[in-house]
Image (cartoon, grey):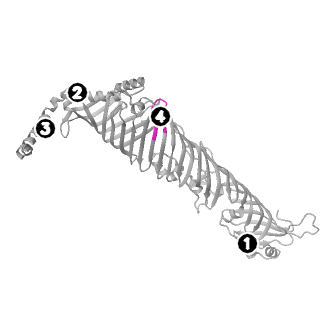
């Protein structure tokens, strides 16, 4: 019956009236019950104890009791307690800072501040040229650290920190050692640290360079971290351009370092560089990159061990050393072993390939300005369409505007390949070189991959190519190249070349088309082609094909631009030196463009070979 009377409408109405009256009394009497000066001192003492700050605000603090007792301060500024002048002394400026309070605690002389909320705050983090930070530990924190350090353990009653909630904030980071500034806008989140012996948890989200990002950080040893000792930490950064996850040990002492497991991923390395504001043209064409391994950082250097890397669709393992010194050139060094790698894709990431209509050369190394590289790479398979290299090993180096790709070893078409591609892109000097050495390679297959038709040599052999240019490789044209080449074949043949029919027509008196004698092949024991190229013209100084019965010799020039050749040749008997009778050589001239060549017989009066 008593319970029924309690919920009777008349009693409920009385209860609601009493609650409303109590709320009105608290609303009217709150400013008299709570000293705003005292609350201000408590907030300032709390912040100063942890962050060595002084607090100032505009106007009169406001007090509310609904939905919970809270006091608010407008246009708040937190500055370093040692004073200073100008905006450099500011640590935090906020449109409003409010704190929940316990009325009962104040009534009994034990003030108790709860969570602090910051509305539109701006946090200023500054790293000076000597490495010092503008945020310093306050007296309470220093005392706590001293006591913790002397006991080598946490004390039982550490000071409370609580939870700070951030609404629509901004973070400004000035790194004077690197002359860099970062602005993170629309910051929302919280910093939760109930007391010094509890876990520290930070969860923030904001907009950096137009991209939304979320950062979390947790540690169960915050006092160790602030004391300059090792502490277990976990942190992650999530955004569209970049994701990072780290779990390990951190130390914030003068010799700060971190070590632990790390995972980094980006769907587009080029987009990441653009987001970061880094001007590094070679990397702008690289697509997705993902890595994980064990990282150790110290100062401005980091080392990645047990690295598993995926880049441009290729997987690799290895070790990387990264250095980003202030106001100096960053550097990357290390060793990567790929299972397979697309060299064309990698080259395309560093420099645009030649277009079919501009005559430029697809040389593959461009000096990477803005970063020093010293890498050793290897691959079980390396593709350079349409070529396939196996057991590939090379070194990539780029220092002070000079870049090189040194191919130490590789298997190509059943043989070995080595070489060097280098470029220099300095203010007063731009040039490049290409050196390739092939041994026991199927040269016929290599020639066929060029797409040329007509009478072409086949067979295994060796090749040495040395090309040079005094132009920047990005603007290089075939007419800018000079150098030499030498090819030697063993036990091969010239396809689409009927030697008897050619000899018969060359002994005549009329011009004929080479394709009219394409109904066979010319077998040879050895063949040697030597020559040089010079700014748009290839001069074939010697091309000798020695068969069992006949030797074919050719020399002359082949211009690049119009493709019209000017060659002289001879066809002679391959007879031993002691032969009693030697037939006169058949001499001829070659004109036209490949493969539509025209043969002009010289006649019986020219008896000496073209060479």
The tag earlier along the polypeptide, 1 or 4, is 4
Q: Is residue 441 above or below residue 495?
A: above
In the depicted view, which residue is nearer to us: 456 or 212? Answer: 212
In the depicted view, which residue is nearer to us: 268 or 469? Answer: 268
Q: Are marks 4 and 2 in contact (CB under 8 Å)?
A: no
Question: Number of callouts in the render?
Answer: 4
Binning the other alpha carbons within 10 Å of mark 2 as few (below 14), some (14 to 19) or many (20 upward) gives: few
> Residue 92's x, y, as percent?
33, 34
Using the numbered discs, state the Cα–Cα distance from disc 4 to disc 2 in whole angstroms: 46 Å
Badge number at residue 177: 4
Q: Which residue is mark 1?
A: 496
Which structural element holds mark 4?
Answer: loop
Using the numbered discs, state the Cα–Cα distance from disc 3 to disc 1 in whole angstroms: 106 Å
Binning the other alpha carbons within 10 Å of mark 3 as few (below 14), some (14 to 19) or many (20 upward) gives: some
Is residue 251 within the magenta segment? yes
Using the numbered discs, state the Cα–Cα distance from disc 3 to disc 4 in whole angstroms: 55 Å
Which residue is located at x 88 percent, y 70 percent?
584
Residue 498 appears in which quarter of the rendering? bottom right
The single residue placed furthest to the right in the displayed view is 580
Q: Are marks 1 and 2 in contact (CB under 8 Å)?
A: no
Q: Are marks 3 and 1 in contact (CB under 8 Å)?
A: no
Q: Which residue is mark 3?
A: 23
Badge number at residue 431: none
The tag earlier along the polypeptide, 3 or 4, is 3
The tag earlier along the polypeptide, 1 or 2, is 2
Q: Are marks 3 and 2 in contact (CB under 8 Å)?
A: no
Badge number at residue 110: 2
Using the numbered discs, state the Cα–Cα distance from disc 1 to disc 4 in whole angstroms: 69 Å
Which residue is located at x 68 percent, y 56 percent?
411
Give the extent of the magenta segment.
247-259
């Amino acid at each position: 019956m008593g319970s029924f009377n309690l919920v009777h409408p008349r009693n409920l109405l009385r209860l609601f009236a009493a609650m409303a009256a109590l709320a009105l009394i608290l609303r009217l009497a709150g400013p008299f019950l709570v000293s705003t000066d005292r609350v201000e001192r408590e907030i300032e003492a709390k912040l100063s104890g942890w962050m060595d700050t002084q607090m100032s605000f505009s106007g009169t603090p406001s007090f509310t009791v609904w939905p919970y007792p809270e006091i608010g301060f407008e246009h708040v500024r937190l500055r370093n307690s040692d004073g200073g002048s100008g905006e450099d002394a500011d640590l935090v400026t906020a449109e409003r800072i409010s704190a929940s309070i316990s009325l009962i605690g104040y009534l009994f002389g034990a003030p108790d501040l709860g969570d602090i909320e910051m509305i539109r705050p701006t946090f200023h983090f500054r790293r000076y040229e000597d490495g010092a930070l503008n945020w310093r530990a306050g007296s309470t924190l220093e005392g706590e650290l001293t006591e913790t350090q002397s006991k080598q353990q946490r004390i039982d009653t550490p000071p409370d920190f609580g939870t700070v909630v951030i609404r629509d904030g901004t973070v400004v980071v000035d790194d004077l050692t690197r002359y860099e500034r970062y602005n993170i806008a629309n910051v929302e989140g919280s910093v939760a640290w109930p007391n010094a012996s509890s876990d520290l948890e930070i969860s923030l989200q904001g907009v950096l360079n137009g991209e939304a990002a979320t950062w979390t950080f947790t540690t169960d040893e915050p006092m160790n971290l602030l004391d300059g000792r090792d502490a277990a930490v976990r942190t992650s950064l999530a955004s569209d351009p970049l994701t990072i996850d780290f779990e390990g040990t951190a130390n914030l002492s003068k010799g700060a370092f971190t070590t632990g497991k790390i995972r980094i991923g980006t769907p587009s390395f080029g987009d990441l560089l653009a987001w970061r504001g880094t001007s590094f043209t070679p990397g702008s064409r690289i697509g997705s990159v993902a890595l994980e391994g064990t990282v150790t950082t110290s100062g401005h250097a980091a080392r990645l061990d047990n690295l598993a890397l995926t880049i441009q669709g290729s997987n690799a393992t290895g070790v990387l050393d990264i250095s980003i010194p202030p106001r100096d050139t960053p550097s990357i060094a290390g060793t990567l072993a790929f299972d397979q790698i697309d060299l064309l894709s990698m080259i395309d990431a560093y420099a645009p390939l030649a277009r079919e209509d501009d005559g430029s050369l697809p040389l593959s190394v461009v000096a990477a300005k803005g970063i020093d590289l010293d890498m050793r790479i290897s691959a079980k398979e390396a593709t350079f369409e349409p070529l396939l290299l196996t057991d590939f090993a090379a070194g990539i180096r780029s220092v002070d505007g000079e870049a090189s790709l040194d191919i130490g070893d590789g298997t190509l078409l059943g043989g070995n390949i080595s070489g060097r591609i280098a470029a220099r892109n300095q203010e007063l000097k731009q040039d490049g070189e290409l050196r390739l050495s092939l041994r026991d390679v199927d040269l016929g297959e290599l020639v066929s991959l060029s797409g040329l038709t007509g009478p072409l040599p086949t067979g295994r052999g060796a090749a040495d190519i040395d090309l040079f240019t005094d132009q920047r490789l990005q603007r290089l044209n075939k007419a800018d190249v000079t150098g030499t080449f030498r090819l030697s074949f063993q036990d091969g043949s010239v396809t689409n070349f009927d030697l008897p029919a050619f000899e018969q027509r060359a002994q005549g008196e009329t011009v004929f088309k080479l394709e009219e004698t394409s109904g066979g092949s010319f077998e040879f024991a050895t063949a040697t082609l030597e020559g040089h190229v010079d700014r748009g013209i290839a001069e074939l100084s010697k091309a000798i094909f020695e068969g069992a019965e006949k030797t074919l010799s050719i020399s002359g020039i082949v211009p690049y631009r119009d493709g019209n050749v000017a060659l002289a040749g001879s066809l002679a008997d391959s007879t031993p030196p002691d032969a009693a009778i030697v037939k006169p050589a058949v001499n001829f001239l070659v004109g036209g463009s490949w493969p539509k060549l025209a043969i002009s017989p010289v006649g019986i009066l020219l008896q000496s070979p073209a060479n």
